[in-house]
Every structure is written in C-alpha cells, then in structure tokens.
Amino acid sequence: MFYVLNGSPRKNHNTAKILNSAMEGVRSLVSDAEFRWIHVYDYSYSGCVSCYGCKRIGGTYYGRCAKRDSITGLLEDISQGDALLIGSPVFFHDLPGQLRNFWSVFCTRISSMDKRTLRLRRSASLSPSSIR
C-alpha cells in the first residue's frame, strides 16, 4: 500500500494535483500499486506531548503512541505501508500546523518502533511552492 498524505487544507488544489501526478509516475513503474489518500485536515488530533509513553521499555505503550485519537490506527497502517508520499503547501516558510502536528506524532512513533518490524522504507515529499 502506498500512502498519499495531503497536508493542504484544500483537498483538490495545487498540492493534490502534484500528488496525483506523482501517483501517475508511481503507477507507470508499479502497475498494481494501491494508494490510500490521507487528508490531514480530516482528522482531529494534536501533536506529540512528550509523555514518553512510547519510549518506556517494558511499558504498556512501548513502540506506539500512548495518546488515543483519530490517527492512532492510521500511524500503524502507514508504518507498515510500502511507501509514503507527502504533499504540502508552504505557509510562511513552514509546514501547515496540522501537518506539523501529524509529522511530530508520526516521527516519534517511528523512532520508538522496533526497526525489525518497521516496513516503511521509502518516502518522498512534494510542495507546489517549489515548482515554478
């Protein structure tokens, strides 16, 4: 499964168009590729709160986020996917807030996982503001 993460609040504008073009490129190389779109603005969550529940060896939540919200299962799915394609607009020389929160939780999750069980090996990021 290829996960396509749209970090734009606008589901069908420039970022989505670029992600669609990238998907066409992937399909030309991997004809049976399956894609799952994720629009970060469709989910309700907050960034990492540094509780370290995911890092306490032997703890209840070791290797996974202790917070339970709308992206809990999604983080596990992405970590087991074949690839992650991320698209984002640039707001004031930075990522949009909702994508930044998603990314902080995702990176914390990945860093605490047992690397032998982590399947995700490839990722790419795209931004419409970097294309002229």
Image (cartoon, grey):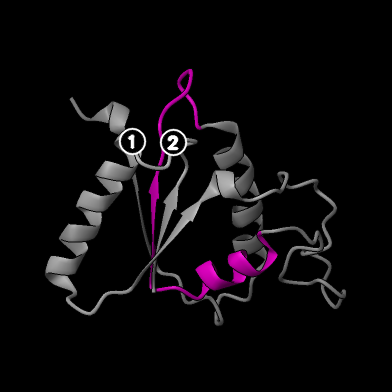
Give the residue at the far front of this rendering. Answer: 12
Query: Horizontal placement of 52 versus 11: left or right?
Result: right
Residue 93 in magenta? yes
Closer to us: 21 or 11: 11
Closer to us: 44 or 125: 44
- Residue marked by disc 2: 10
Residue 38 in magenta? no
Numbered marks: total? 2
Instruction: Tell me the tag on residue 121.
Output: none
Give the residue at the far left of this rendering. Answer: 28
Query: Horizontal placement of 91 versus 16: left or right?
Result: right
Q: CA distance from mark 1 to mark 2?
A: 6 Å
Closer to us: 78 or 109: 78
Q: Are marks 1 and 2 in contact (CB under 8 Å)?
A: yes
Give residue 13's quadrant in the image: top left
Locate residue 92, reporting x and y percent.
48, 17
Residue 130, above or below 76? above
Write down the region rendered in magenta: 71-95
Locate residue 97, reporting x and y percent.
60, 33
Q: Secondary structure at mark 2?
A: loop
Q: Secondary structure at mark 1?
A: loop
Locate residue 22, reporting x and y percent.
23, 53
Give the amino acid type for the residue marked by disc 1 in the picture: His
- Residue marked by disc 1: 13
- For label 2, the crowd category at 10 Å Cα-Cα, with few meaning under 14, some 14 to 19 and many 20 or more, is few
Quarter of the image for the C terminus: give it. Answer: top left
- For label 1, the crowd category at 10 Å Cα-Cα, with few meaning under 14, some 14 to 19 and many 20 or more, is few
